[in-house]
Image (tube, helix red, strand yellow):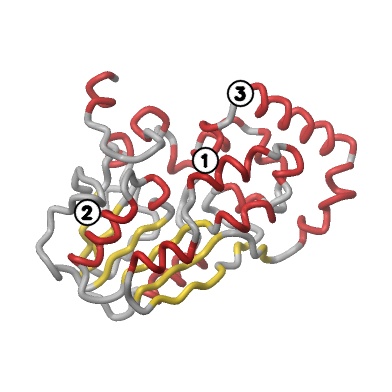
Amino acid sequence: MAAIHSEWIGGDHNYDLSGRGYPNYRRADPRIAALIHSALGDAKTVLNIGAGSGNYEPEDRYVIAIEPSVVMRAQRPKHLVPAIHGAAESLPLDDASVDASMAILTIHQWGDLERGLRELRRVTRGPIVIMTFDPSALNRLWLSHYIPEFHLIEGKRFRPIDEICGLLAENTSVSTIPIPLDCVDGFTEAYYGRPEAFLDPAVRKSQSAWSFMDPPIVRNGIDLLFKDIESGHWDRMFGHLRTQPFFEGALRLIIRH
């Protein structure tokens, strides 16, 4: 394990230590994938930076995948291209060498966001597509009712959307991604109408946010959530979400056109 840890060049969360089993809970949701693939336009070559286990990679284009975690690279499906060991801040690509780039739920992991986005601009001829969370909207999820520290801690990891757009230094657009009730990509907001999911430690392990919170705070919050689900109190407060088709929370799609 020490040898794996020594090659980690990612950001604030080490997936070499916690990424095993990630694809069991984090899979590309087809409705979100359609938005990402549409944003890539007619690009034939696509760079996927922070590629992880391959979620949201288009399978009808030539993809260059770059991922710092050996554990995540090993979990990529056989039909996808192998990922190259590397990080956003130093891309092993020539200038203007790809038609488009994508960075999906990864930029908050980068050690130097400005340098990483500068590198994406350097190597990309066309669209740069980024999916991330708006830190100012993280408290829209009811989870903050049980763990107030959740959106406060996460808010420090995610950079303001306006700052990201400014660093892209090009014409950009930002849209809110509606999250479907049966979303199969298990980030936190995906379970807005399925509170029981957070009682499962494996679900929480697939979400990096929990690793930044003190275990006693997590235990207390999860215990309270369990009691409220059992008593019906959660449903009295938030039960309408169990049938709400979509949730517009903090998930954003940023496109440099």
Q: Residue at x 56, y 34 (%)?
A: 210
Q: Nearer the viewer, residue 54 or 147?
A: 147
Q: In this view, does 186 lie to the left or right of 221?
A: left
Q: Mark 3 points at which residue?
A: 215
Q: Which mark is residue 81?
A: 2
Q: In this view, does 13 lie above or below 180?
A: above
Q: Nearer the viewer, mark 3 or mark 2?
A: 3
Q: Image point 40% across, 32% down: which residue?
A: 20
Residue in the foreground of this view, choosing between 188 and 252: 252
Name the one closer to the observer, 255 or 76: 255
- Which of the 4 quarters of the picture holds residue 151? top right
The residue at the far left in this view is 94
Q: What is the three-letter code of the residue carrying label 1? A: Gln
Number of numbered discs: 3
Q: Distance between the residues labelled 1 and 2?
A: 25 Å
Query: Residue 10, located in which quarter of the rendered image?
Result: top left
In the structure shown, which secondary structural element does the residue marked by tag 3 occupy? helix
Look at label 3 and name its amino acid. Answer: Pro
> Which residue is depicted at the point 40% across and 37% down?
12
Q: How far apart are marks 3 and 1 (CA)?
A: 15 Å
**Residue at position x 43%, y 35% in the image:** 21
Measured as percent of width and height from the top left, residue 53 is found at 35, 47
Q: Which of marks 1 and 2 is nearer the N terminus?
A: 2
Crowding around mark 3 (Cα neighbors within 10 Å: few <14, some 14 to 19, many 20+) is few
- The alpha-carbon separation of the residues under discs 3 and 2 comes to 37 Å
Q: Do the residues labelled 1 and 2 touch (CB within 8 Å)?
A: no
Dot 2 amino acid type: Val
Write down the residue under mark 1.
Answer: 207
Does 64 sit left or right of 234 as displayed?
Answer: left
**Direction from residue 151 to residue 81 in the image, left or right:** left
Give the numbered dot on residue 26. Answer: none
Q: Is residue 30 above or below residue 80?
A: below
